[in-house]
Structure formats: C-alpha cells, structure tokens
Image: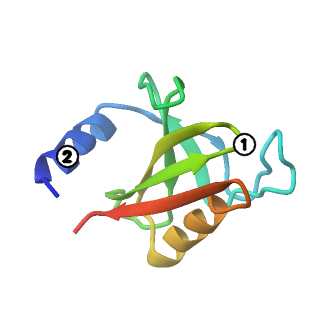
Amino acid sequence: MSNVFWERLDELVGSSRIIVDRPRGSRHPNFPSAVYPLDYGYLENTTGGDGHEIDVWSGSSASKVLDAVLCTVDLHKRDAELKLLIGCTEEEKRLVYDFHTTASSAAVFVERH
C-alpha cells in the first residue's frame, strides 16, 4: 500500500483535534449493551462516510501514532465507514475489531507497516 495514504492520514490527524465523546467504559446511547472498550470519538471538522466526522479509537500507547484503519460495514445502519486507530496495542485492536463484529456488522483491518 502506498505510503502517501498514511502520510495524508497523518496530516489529517495532525491538523485536527480529537474529540472523545464516548470514553472507555461508557455505553452506546442507542444500544446500552454495547460498552466502549477504548476512548471513542472523532476528528473535529472532518467528514466521514456517514456524513459525520471521521471516527477515531484512541488506545493506551504513549505514542499516539496512527496504527491502523478499520473498514466497517453495518447492515442495520446500511452504511460503511473508516475508523482510525491511534495509539492502540494489539489487544486493543482486537477489542475494537470485536466491538464492530456483530450479527449485522463486520470489519477488516488495514494495518500500517
């Protein structure tokens, strides 16, 4: 995969403020059984595939490097999106993947190498 893809994402992340509106341990507002395993939010003043800001999962690593992109499809919401993973350990990546893999949704990772 082209390094330009990651460079552009780095520029986008570096020039945007990350807003965490769903802290680790909080519940999804529409699906209370879904508990956020990491801080979840968005890049301020951006636009994602759903017309809202680009989603971000923020992990516990001290280096807040963009680690991976999660591509999701949700049949219930009838949408597909990219979610950026920043500073995530391998275990945190698995937790995020599991969060987005349900009866009506699926996900794949594009990891940075």
Q: Residue at x 56, y 48 (%)?
A: 73
Q: Secondary structure under badge 1?
A: loop
Mark 1, mark 2: which one is toward the viewer?
Answer: 1
Q: Residue furthest right?
A: 32
Query: In what quadrant of the picture does the C terminus appear?
Result: bottom left
Where in the figure is residue 55, as x and y percent of width and height? 51, 41
- N-term-proximal mark, 1 vs 2: 2
For label 2, the crowd category at 10 Å Cα-Cα, with few meaning under 14, some 14 to 19 and many 20 or more, is few
The amino acid marked with disc number 1 is: His
The colour scheme used here is rainbow
> Residue extending furthest bottom?
91
Image coords of residue 96 (percent x, y): 57, 63
**Left or right, residue 112 beside residue 81:** left
Q: Quadrant of the N terminus?
A: bottom left
The structure residue drawn at horizontal position 57% and vertical position 41%, both measured from the top left corner, is 41
Give the distance between the C-alpha atoms of the residues marked 1 and 2, in whole angstroms. 29 Å
Name the residue carrying label 2. Answer: 5
Locate residue 27, reporting x and y percent. Answer: 80, 50
At horizontal 67% and vertical 57% (from top left) the residue drawn is 24
In-image side of 40 versus 84 (left or right): right
Secondary element at tag 2: helix
Q: Residue at x 46, y 27 (%)?
A: 44
User: Could you tell whether 7 is left or right of 64 in the image?
Assistant: left
Quadrant of the image occupied by residue 14: top left
Closer-to-camera residue (63/35): 35
Q: What residue is pinned by disc 1?
A: 76
Marks 1 & 2, CB-CB < 8 Å contact? no
Q: In which image quadrant can residue 85 be found?
A: bottom left
Three-letter code, disc 2 = Phe
